Image (cartoon, rainbow, N blue to C red):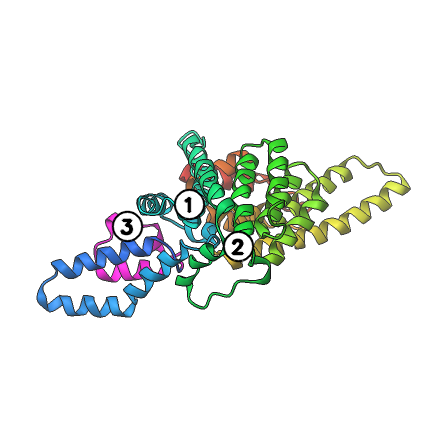
Amino acid sequence: MDPILQKPLRDIERLDELLDLFHAIPDKHLERLAIIEKIENLARSAPADEQHHIRQAMQGIQSDKQKDLILSALHIPWGDWSRIYRLRGLPRAIDYIERLLQDSETRPNILYNLAFLYYIAYGMLRDEQGRKNPEYRRRALELAGKAQAIYRREHIGRLEQFMTRMGSLIIHEWRKNLPEYCLALTCNIVSLINLLDQRYDEALESINESFEPHPTPPEIYFSMGIYFLRKGAFNPAIRMLNESIKKRGEHSAEAFYQLGRVYYLKVRHFQKEIGALTDGADDVRRRRHLKGLIDKRIQKAMDAFQASLGEDPYFPLPYYWMGLTYLLKTDCHCQTAIDHIEMALRLDPRNISRYLKTYPPGCQADNPSCNRKKIGLLTAQLIEGH
């Protein structure tokens, strides 16, 4: 991880560091607007002999084009916001769009995008005791409701006007009925919130409501996959998450990550089944069969976590669960597991420290040379260090 990503923007004043941060964060990240603003302030306050150099730097990053690109992204009702804002600057992004909404209360796409960011904040940001902020939940549902009401009465021509700033953006065949498609997205915000709150009956109801206006948004298949996962229905969860991945929505990194978790949990289920078997002939055959399934599911889990990181290399949870998955192997991989968990901690110290306590690592290797205490000691050191 680039060290500049861990430095707060308020502590960065030098032009070279501002440029390093600009290039380290993803495209369409609202943090880039704040960086451009700081560089513009530097240009205004710098001595005359330095102003030319700063303005050359601004031309190099195409600051005006960047502003248009970022603001244009807010005018379409989909974009990989979870990937963009997971890295840093989520509260600042929310504050910026809230200010933007003062002149855009009737723009449903901006309302939806802000609702989605509040949903991310509700799921990601916790206080010192690990509690979610109910205000994020309230605001996400409020904004989704406002956007939903507008989408219900909008004419498709009006919605297509929101797309013009994106220039040559191609709308796929399944996105042509824009009002219905967008209405399904706003309904799905309710599903995502219900899943976070573990209100599964309400989640299933809102997922079904999301399918009614338009049955194709990949985000709805993601929600359905999470619902099945939470209910312990592994195979339906795999089918739904794969469908979401195939359609490539704004949950691509999460869909791969959750798919990896499904395979991880299937392995744990098979291991429990093996633990209940006897030494009878039928059980011996069953044990051999299950061990073969476990090896394949471990590899599928690894592939899914790696694909998630391919979508978003700054997503901490796939690193953490990949570490846990290494510990399921019959050969000892304690150090490799710790390396992955350490990477997750560097990306998100607070949440991963909480995961270490909730889902503590434990080596499952059959290797007698594995020191079982090692993983416990390393885990304790990681928790203490954060």
Q: Nearer the viewer, residue 269 or 100?
A: 100
Secondary element at tag 2? helix
Which is more N-terminal, label 1 or label 3?
3
Residue 330 seen in the current view: no
Instruction: Read off the residue under disc 3.
Output: 9
The tag on residue 111 is 1
Where residue 244 appears, x then y in whole percent?
61, 53
Q: Is residue 103 left or right of residue 364?
A: left
Do labels 3 and 1 touch, CB within 8 Å? no
Counting labels gives 3
Element at label 3: helix
Is residue 5 magenta-colored? yes
Q: Can you say which quadrant of the picture contains the C terminus?
A: top left
Choose mark 3 or mark 1, whichever is in front.
1
Looking at the image, residue 153 sits to the left or right of residue 96; the answer is: right
**Mark 2 = which residue?**
178
Question: What type is the residue that disc 1 sits on?
Answer: Leu
Asked whether residue 34 is drawn in magenta, I would say no
Mark 3 Cα within 10 Å, few/some/many (few <14, many 20+)?
A: some
In space, the residues marked 3 and 1 are separated at their CA atoms by 27 Å
Quarter of the figure with the N terminus: bottom left
Structural crowding at the residue carrying mark 2, measured as other residues with C-alpha within 10 Å and reported as few (<14), some (14–19) or many (≥20)? many
Camera-side residue of 11 and 188: 188
Amino acid tagged 3: Leu
Label 2 and label 1: CA atoms lie apart by: 15 Å
Please state which of residues 5 and 100 is positioned toward the viewer in this rendering.
Answer: 100
The secondary element bearing badge 1 is classed as: helix
**Could you tell me residue 56's position as x and y percent?**
22, 70
